[in-house]
Amino acid sequence: MSLTEFVAVKGPPRGWTQVAAGAAALLAALPLTVFLVLLRGHTGSVPEEQVVARVVMALAAMFVVPVAGYLAWRRRAAKPAVLALVVLATVVVLLLAIYLYSVESAVRFPADILLWSEGDFVSDIVKFRLGHPIYGAPADIESFTYTPGSQILTQAIARVVGAPDSIPAFRAIQLGYLALASLFAMLACRRVLARATGETPIEHPLLWSAVWAVVLFLIGGNTVTSPFTHLLHNDALALLVCALGYYLLVEFVATGNAWLLLPMALLPGFGFLAKQSLAVWAGIYSLFLLVFERRLGWVRLGAFAVASFGSVALAVGACYLAWGQHFFYWTFQVMGNHHISPLRSAQHVLDAWEYFAAGLVGGFLVLDWQRFDRWTGLWLAALGLLAVEAYTSGIAWMLNHMGPGSMLCGIWLLAALTRSWSGLSAPRTGAPLLVWARPATALGAVLLAMSGLGLIRVPTPSLPDDAHRYMAEIEREFAGEPADQVLLDYGSWIYARNGVVMKDHAAPIGEAGFTATADFSGILARINSRFYRRILVRDYDSPEFTYDYMLWPRSSGIKAALDANYVAVRKIAEVQGRGRNPPWFKTITVLEPRAK
């Protein structure tokens, strides 16, 4: 399809053409990102401010090309609303390039210490590769508190692409999940908009498809409610499951295709394997069909509910058969003993108000408020999921639980924006400046809203160069020692190289200690027998020491055991760099056994 056809086509595009347009827009950011990375790589010792200035100048040059191309093509026939849409599409692709540029250094970092979950994520992959049980005895403290779907699927994909042991490849796969999630969300947006416009064709649907896909990708990686999707956590696959689940529901409402009930019934079970909380889709689907779907009889509705909840039961049963009671301990007992703070949940609603506002405004502008129908139910499902996520996020201070609901609310906001944009194309008379000022004002408002939604980032790498020094110093502490006898609190990349499933990691100890479900007998025995030849820990002399945290209901006794049996011999300096480093870049204390 030519550029002229892409910009000027009217009418509803076929689904595959819309997916192609969205995927093309996502892929268009890749060469731009590579150029920015190469530009940064040739700056040498140039100050960071100058590097950012060069990147901004390069982005400005990239911005001019499509805008100038449209003006040169249309000349005096150029329409203000169409030009504003071309500018919007150009800007969002450049914002995606900035996002990829900013996370590139993190994605390529070969050590799994950028998030508390990364070491256990990689450890599960090692277990799967070695045939070791994913969930072990509580005293071994070697298990992750999430279900293993994301870890197993990531390992399978990494094997297919020929990078079974590559931590950067694992992170890149998370971005692949995010890209697929944005395409499913884009297709849902298409259906919502078609309902809002009464199937009236919109102008430039393929250009809008590109905007939807890119903006939804940016929402999936926004800095407010979804900052970890490029790292090793279950968040990226959770986004994909929820986007697919919502798309299936929207498609069922739009088409009435009863065959869609089959994947809808299976999705909660697969969702549970990705993250325990995604079993909620069994309730979302069943409640929606009960309240809003009159085309199903009671028999089919009951059969669907049984199948939907049954898929979750089947997934739970399969995990139990594979790993027994240890599976229940780590994924239900430990996780289930987290206490939700209603005040913290309320604070999270205020912190993420932009996404609640996005869903509310989108519904206000899209829905037919004369009827309370299935489309109203779809809107309530998106808002309801975000509200449930806000409540459950009260177990901690992070807002990443709210990522999927934020993306679903973004669907409604984008549908409302597209519908409202058509009003800018209506013929108008008056001073030429005012004719152009109206779409320019609308474009400015949209860009400011994107900033509030956490979609705009400063074009700087997320990791300082000193992170590689930090990683190298950690690795030197393992030199000449058996890997299983050197304990590193966070991170499994060295153990993965040596085929070791390591015990006593800090993250599961922290989870079990905070919830008062821990069995510390194993680690205390290993410390008291001085099994470890070397121990590397952060915050050793701080009340925030992960192995004996100040807010636990009772002390683990680990700090006292370490003081009695080990002595600090040196430190690894924290990562130096501008900005705020993650907690896993703090100073490391190196402990060795006391002389007998």
Image (cartoon, rainbow, N blue to C red):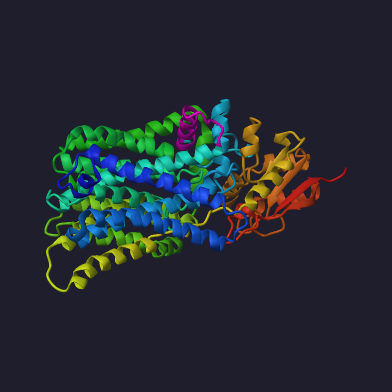
Image point 55% across, 38% down: which residue? 167
Give whichever of 62, 362 is nearer the camera: 62
On the question of residue 529 being in view, the answer is yes
Q: Quadrant of the C terminus?
A: top right
Image point 66% across, 53% down: which residue? 548
Q: Is residue 41 above or below residue 542?
A: above
Q: Quadrant of the N terminus?
A: top left
On the question of residue 365 being in view, the answer is no
Tell me where residue 35 appears, x and y as whole percent: 47, 48
Tell me where residue 510 appears, x and y as whole percent: 60, 49
Q: Is residue 213 above or below residue 258?
A: below
Image point 27% across, 51% down: which residue? 381
Secondary structure, magenta segment, majority class = helix
Tell me where residue 75 appears, x and y as whole percent: 21, 58
Q: Is residue 582 above or below residue 188?
A: below
Question: In screen coordinates, is 590 left or right of 420?
Answer: right
Which residues are the magenta region?
A: 149-166
Question: In screen coordinates, is 115 left or right of 547?
Answer: left
**Residue furthest to the top:** 131
Tell me where residue 65 appears, x and y as whole percent: 34, 54
Does residue 514 show up magenta in the picture?
no
Question: In screen coordinates, is 139 left or right of 102?
Answer: right
